[in-house]
Structures are given as structure tokens and as C-alpha cells.
Image: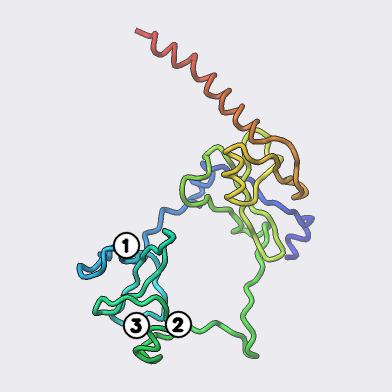
Amino acid sequence: RSRWEAAGQPLFGKVWNHDELVAAKIIAAPRAAPNDELQTPAGWPDNIKVDTGTWVLWLPDGWMQGITTNCKDKEMKIFMSPEGKPFHHMKDIAKKFGQAILKQGPKKDCGSKGQKKVKPVRFITDDDAVPRWPDGDWLPKEFKVCLRQLPTGLHTVFIPPGRKGEGCLFQRAQVLEYLSGKIEFLFSLTTGRMISYSPSAEYAAGKRANEESAQPEAKRANKAP
């Protein structure tokens, strides 16, 4: 904290582009799901598939976690007994087989007086304070990222191209709205306050300019013998 205060308590850290994070080996390879090699047992109902993600810690030995779809087309977890019988809730399993069948999850790390252990707050002036490029392909590579200082720690923000790095977006939902032309504001990289203008239109105009500048070169390449 003292280092952050000595630096003038900045709100935002260094700005990084995608290639810089790749060069710094900050972008990790996609992680495999914990149970991605499991296959759905043959005796299960057709509407239930094995859950290849993270399973609940209390699931009894021999049981499996699955995924099904409810009447509203929403995915929900379901727990399958060794005999292939589905259960929707932990309390239903405990009621039928007894509480002792459930596994005990790891206890929370508490201090000597029974208080929860508090994680130290990280600051953008820390040596390891480097943002991570988000998983998936929803963030265009021409965007940039940096860390924003919050009272509770660090948060990654997203900087669109075309404004000389003076504004950012705080959330994925804002980025998607920006790309679809539905958002008309950014947040200042100096004060964190909202900047009102139409960045989406500017972003679209910049993309059109890049496409138009590329067209003459494409035509010349087609005319070449």
C-alpha cells in the first residue's frame, strides 16, 4: 500500500495489448474441464448428460454429477446414484440415505479467534499486477486491457481503439453493447468518471476506414500477373 500511495494513488495501471501479454506469457493456455474425459453412463435417461465441469465437494463416493434441462430450457445440475437414480438436491440425498453418506468439504481457514482469514488487498503498483486477457473470443484483439484499482483489489478493464486510450469499459456486457452500437459512453482512464459521446459509432467508422484502405491493395493484387 505504501508503494501505491507514494506513486500518488493511481486509479489505473499500465495499458497492455494482446501481443504484449502473449510475449510476456501472461495469456494462459485454455484449461481442460476437471472431468472432461468422463462419458455419460449408458443407463442414464436421455435428457441427462455427465457434467464435465467441477463437481460439488459433498458428492458421495460412487455418485456422479450430471446436467439436465428443465421445462424452461435452463440447464441445472443433477446428482446420480450408483444405480442411476437422479436426485435434484443434497437434502433429498441426505433424507433418503442419511447425512453420514455426504462428504465433508474443506473447512474455511479462520484466524485464532474464529474470524475469517482476510486476503491482502492487491495494488496496481505490485510487481505482479498484470492483467490477463479474458478467456473466449468475445474481446477483439485490437482492444487493450489494464487494471483498475478498487478498495477491495484489482479489476481488469477494456480499452477500445480509436480514442487514444482515454476511455475504457468496466464489464464484458458493456463491451458487447459497445460492439453492437448500443452504448454511448466510456469511463475516463484518469478519473474513472463517465465520458459521454458515441464511441461505438467511432469504432464502426474506424473499422470501415481500415476495410476501405485494404480494398485498393486487394484490387492491385488481383490485377497483378
> What residue is pinned by disc 3?
60
From mark 1 to mark 3, how far is it between C-alphas?
20 Å
| Residue 205, position as x, y percentages in the image | 61, 27
Outermost residue, left side: 42
Marks 1/2 in contact by CB < 8 Å: the verdict is: no
Q: Nearer the viewer, residue 221 or 193?
A: 193
Marks 3/2 in contact by CB < 8 Å: the verdict is: no
Q: Secondary structure at mark 2?
A: loop
**Hey, which quadrant is residue 161 in on the image?**
top right
> What residue is pinned by disc 1?
36
Q: Residues within 10 Å of mark 3 (few under 14, many from 20)?
A: some
Amino acid on which disc 2 is placed: Gly
From mark 1 to mark 2, how far is it between C-alphas?
22 Å
Counting residues from the N terminus, which is met first, the one under dot 3 or under dot 2? 3
Q: Is residue 96 left or right of residue 143?
A: left
- Would you place residue 206 above or below residue 1 in this image? above
For image coordinates 70% across by 51% down, the residue present is 12
From mark 3 to mark 2, how far is it between C-alphas?
11 Å
Q: Is residue 27 left or right of residue 85?
A: right
> What residue is pinned by disc 2?
105
Amino acid on which disc 3 is placed: Pro
Q: Nearer the viewer, mark 3 or mark 2?
A: 3
**Hey, which quadrant is residue 204 in on the image?**
top right
Q: Nearer the viewer, residue 113 or 60?
A: 60
| Residue 20, position as x, y percentages in the image | 54, 43
Q: Nearer the viewer, mark 1 or mark 3?
A: 3
**Hey, which quadrant is residue 39 in on the image?**
bottom left
Marks 1/3 in contact by CB < 8 Å: the verdict is: no
Counting residues from the N terminus, which is met first, the one under dot 1 or under dot 3? 1
Amino acid on which disc 1 is placed: Asp
